[in-house]
Amino acid sequence: MTQSAPAPNDAPVASHDHLVRSSLQRAGRLPVDAWTITDSDDLFDAGLTSHASVAVLVDLEDSIGTEFPDVLLRKSTFASIATIRAALALVLEGTDGTDGRKDAAASVPGSRR
């Protein structure tokens, strides 16, 4: 079965997914191919270490040319491809998603404390 190209509304998601998976592949030091992990798989169960998550963060920041705000620098932000992608979307939108709240990671869909 061939996969169709993403619809125009899906283009940012596809682009963010590519950025996240590419960074995981380059810097995540995972024992598995980042392109085989599902969006909701726990990356730490897949072999991501806290040290490697920092390397992924730096790689992503280098790729997009901006830094993640401190409020998103939590283990839960890097728990899955979906949570990293959601955090990346917030950063690229120019917001940290806090709306004044202390627990910004709660605004990242699928994140856990």
Image (cartoon, helix red, strand yellow):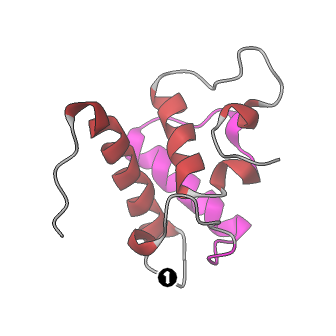
Residue 72 inside the magenta-drawn segment: yes
Q: Residue at x 21, y 32 (%)?
A: 8
Q: Residue at x 47, y 50 (%)?
A: 60
Q: Main secondary structure of the magenta part?
A: helix
Which quarter of the picture shows residue 23?
Answer: bottom left
Compared with residue 101, is residue 108 higher up or lower down, i.e. above or below?
A: below
Mark 1 surroundings: few (<14), some (14-19) or many (≥20) residues within 10 A = few
Q: Position of residue 22 (x, y in %)?
A: 38, 61
Most extreme residue toward the bottom is 31
Compared with residue 70, is residue 46 higher up or lower down, i.e. above or below?
A: below
Q: Position of residue 47 (x, y in %)?
A: 64, 78
Q: Position of residue 77 (x, y in %)?
A: 67, 48
Q: Residue at x 71, y 22 (%)?
A: 98
Residue corresponding to mark 1: 32
Which quarter of the picture shows residue 45?
Answer: bottom right
Compared with residue 9, is residue 110 higher up or lower down, i.e. above or below?
A: below
Number of numbered tags placed on the structure image: 1
Residue 41 inside the magenta-drawn segment: no
Q: Residue at x 63, y 26 (%)?
A: 96
**Local SS, label 1:** loop
Q: Position of residue 110 (x, y in %)?
A: 66, 46
Quarter that holds the N terminus: bottom left
- Read off the magenta span: 45-74
Q: Is 66 left or right of 40, judged from the image as shown?
A: left
Residue kind at label 1, given as amino acid type: Val
Most extreme residue toward the top is 100
Q: Is 113 left or right of 61, judged from the image as shown?
A: right
Compared with residue 4, is residue 89 higher up or lower down, i.e. above or below?
A: above
